[in-house]
Amino acid sequence: MIRPCTQADFEAIWQIINDAAQAYQGVIPADRWHEPYMSKVQLQREIDDGVRFWGFDSDDGLLGVMGVQDKGEVNLIRHAYVKTAHRRKGIGAQLLGFLESRCDKPILVGTWADARWAVSFYQKHGYRLLGTQEKNALLRKFWSIPPRQVETSVVLANAKWRGVGRP
């Protein structure tokens, strides 16, 4: 079942993110890796900034989470993670499909360029990679990330993206 996450899910969300993010270790630039990958303070800051998490819930508890952030002219998919032990079972696809069905605006996704599995996942679901110039402008406009992360990330867009908000 997919359901909105609440404050009571905070610890589970944090654990899922940090469990799943272990896949980034040794893949993303070493200067961008942290342990834990996301601190509780950072997670709370994301929630306070409008990221609304949805969770894939089962008898075993939350198995995956995906956030959506309304940025006016677009929605951003943020922090999409599935517990390592439950990957490749369609949980991410179900979460993405659910959130897409609730979003009437274009959807953008930012991820690490070297996280090829993540890029491939979104491409498999109809998202396309944007060019470097557009990616850089969008990351600066809609995300609050350091320049080094802009440099080492990509942005993918769903079929509704027609350049809304292009600089």
Image (cartoon, helix red, strand yellow):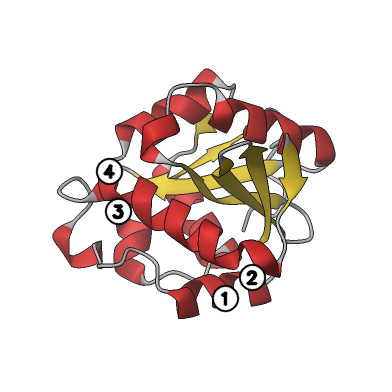
Could you say where residue 142 lies in the image, as x and y percent from the top left?
A: 60, 63
Q: CA distance from mark 1 to mark 4?
A: 22 Å
Q: Residue at x 43, y 41 (%)?
A: 83
Residue matched to label 1 = 44
Q: CA distance from mark 3 to mark 1?
A: 24 Å
Discs 2, 3 touching: Cβ within 8 Å: no
Mark linked to residue 23: 4
Q: CA distance from mark 4 to mark 3?
A: 16 Å
Q: Nearer the viewer, residue 83 or 154?
A: 83
- State whether residue 29 appears in this view: yes
Circle 3 or circle 1, nearest the eye: 1
Could you say where residue 33 lies in the image, as x and y percent from the top left?
A: 23, 62
Q: Nearer the viewer, residue 127 or 86?
A: 86
Q: CA distance from mark 4 to mark 2?
A: 23 Å
Secondary structure under the numbered disc 1 in the rendered image: helix
- What's under tag 2, amino acid-wise? Ile
Mark linked to residue 127: none
Q: CA distance from mark 1 to mark 2?
A: 5 Å
Residue matched to label 2 = 47
Secondary structure under the numbered disc 4 in the rendered image: helix
Q: Nearer the viewer, residue 107 or 162?
A: 107
Secondary structure under the numbered disc 3 in the rendered image: loop
- State whether residue 160 appears in this view: no
Of marks 4 and 3, which one's residue comes earlier in the chain? Answer: 4
